[in-house]
Image (cartoon, helix red, strand yellow):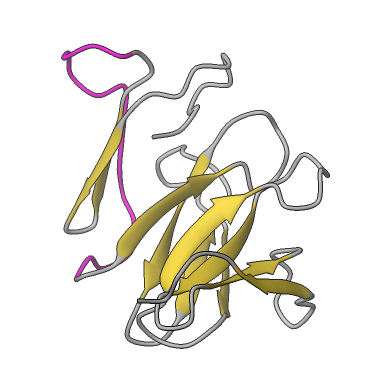
Amino acid sequence: MGDWDGDGVDTPGIYRGNHFALRNSNNARFSDIDFAYGNGGNWILIAGDWDSDGKDEVGVYIPESGTFALRSNTNPGQEITTTFRYGNPYWLPLAGDWNRDGKDEVGVFIRESAVFALRSNTVPGQEVTNAFQYGDPR
């Protein structure tokens, strides 16, 4: 789910293989935005407003390597990607605005210890993390 067109309403998006299909309304019609991105596999889709333009963009988490690849827009053929490793493989990826700067950042949830590790920016090599336990790891 994401606000792909900046109208303040989150709408669905799906990801199969390396194909994204995003809707700008909550109904069962055809997708409004279609594009290929990445090489598929068992990548996990995440969404967030990476550039604070009021629209959500897509990203993927590659669990085998603990790598995030965040796409700067949803315009086919115009992708600019920020790629960086964060955390360890197979942690659960998260996205949200952790520091109220209007941009979403990434984080991970470590199931074994019930720890949230929230990264304060998406600039490779400049990570600052707020980590805390919440919940029961059992």
Q: Which residue is pictured at 72% across the width and 52% down the height?
A: 98
Residue 79 is one of the magenta-drawn residues: no
- What secondary structure do most residues of the magenta stretch adopt? loop
Determine if residue 12 is in view: yes
Residue 68 x %, y %: 49, 70
Numbered range of the magenta stretch = 26-41
Residue 51 versus residue 42 in the image, above or below: above
Determine if residue 21 is in view: no
Residue 107 versus residue 62 in the image, above or below: above
Residue 136 x %, y %: 45, 70
Is residue 54 found left or right of 17 in the rendered image? right
Q: Which residue is pictured at 50% across the width and 52% down the height?
A: 79
Q: Which residue is pictured at 35% across the width and 76% down the height?
A: 138
Residue 1 x %, y %: 39, 35
Is residue 69 found left or right of 111 in the rendered image? right
Which of the two residues, 112 or 56, is positioned nearer the viewer here?
112
Task: Quadrant for residue 124, please give it.
Answer: bottom right
Residue 28 x %, y %: 16, 14
Is residue 49 found left or right of 76 in the rendered image? right
